[in-house]
Image (spheres, rainbow, N blue to C red):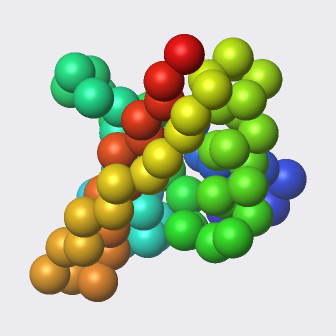
């Protein structure tokens, strides 16, 4: 797949890979109907998401994880200024 990236931004290609079960986690933002991206749910994914939130000025960052019956997860990313 994409070895240089940890978080894979949304595109038609990454959506197709998600639909085929290639990614373990879909990343969502509240109030947004389209996913932000996809990842494997590793510790390095969480670290990258935290670093991105801090670089964008979020004072608080949390991830709400919703497990799916398939074993995959939907993560909703929440940040406070």
Residue most toward the right?
4
Tell me where residue 31 appears, x and y as whole percent: 22, 21
Could you tell me residue 80's position as x and y percent?
48, 24
**The quarter of the displayed image where residue 15 is located:** top left
Tell me if 26 is positioned left or right of 80 in this view.
Answer: left
Count of numbered circles on the image: 0
Residue situated in front as seen by the camera: 56 or 4: 56
Farthest left residue?
A: 69
Q: Residue at x 33, y 62 (%)?
A: 65
Tell me which residue sits at (42%, 62%) in the image.
25
Of the 4 image quadrants, the one containing the C terminus is: top right
Q: Which quarter of the picture shows residue 20?
A: bottom left
Viewer-proximal residue, 46 or 27? 46
Q: Is residue 2 visible?
A: no
**Left or right: where does residue 80 sit relative to residue 70?**
right
- Relative to 32, 6 lies left or right: right
Tell me if 56 is positioned left or right of 25 in this view: right
Position of residue 44 relative to residue 70, above or below, is: above
Q: Residue shown at 44%/70% (left/top)?
A: 24
- Residue 70 place in picture, x, y as percent: 21, 81
Residue 70 visible in this rendered orientation of the protein: yes
Looking at the rendering, in which quadrant would you find the N terminus? bottom right
State whether residue 40 is above or below residue 31: below
- Is residue 2 positioned above or below 60 on the image? below
Q: Position of residue 22 (x, y in %)?
A: 45, 69
């Amino acid at each position: 797949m994409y070895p240089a990236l940890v978080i894979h931004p949304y595109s038609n290609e990454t959506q197709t890979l998600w639909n085929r079960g290639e990614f373990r986690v879909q990343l969502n933002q509240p109030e947004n109907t389209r996913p932000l991206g996809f990842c494997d749910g590793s510790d390095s994914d969480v670290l990258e998401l935290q670093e991105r939130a801090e670089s964008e000025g979020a004072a608080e960052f949390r991830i709400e994880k919703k497990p799916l019956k398939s074993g995959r997860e939907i993560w909703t990313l929440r940040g406070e200024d």
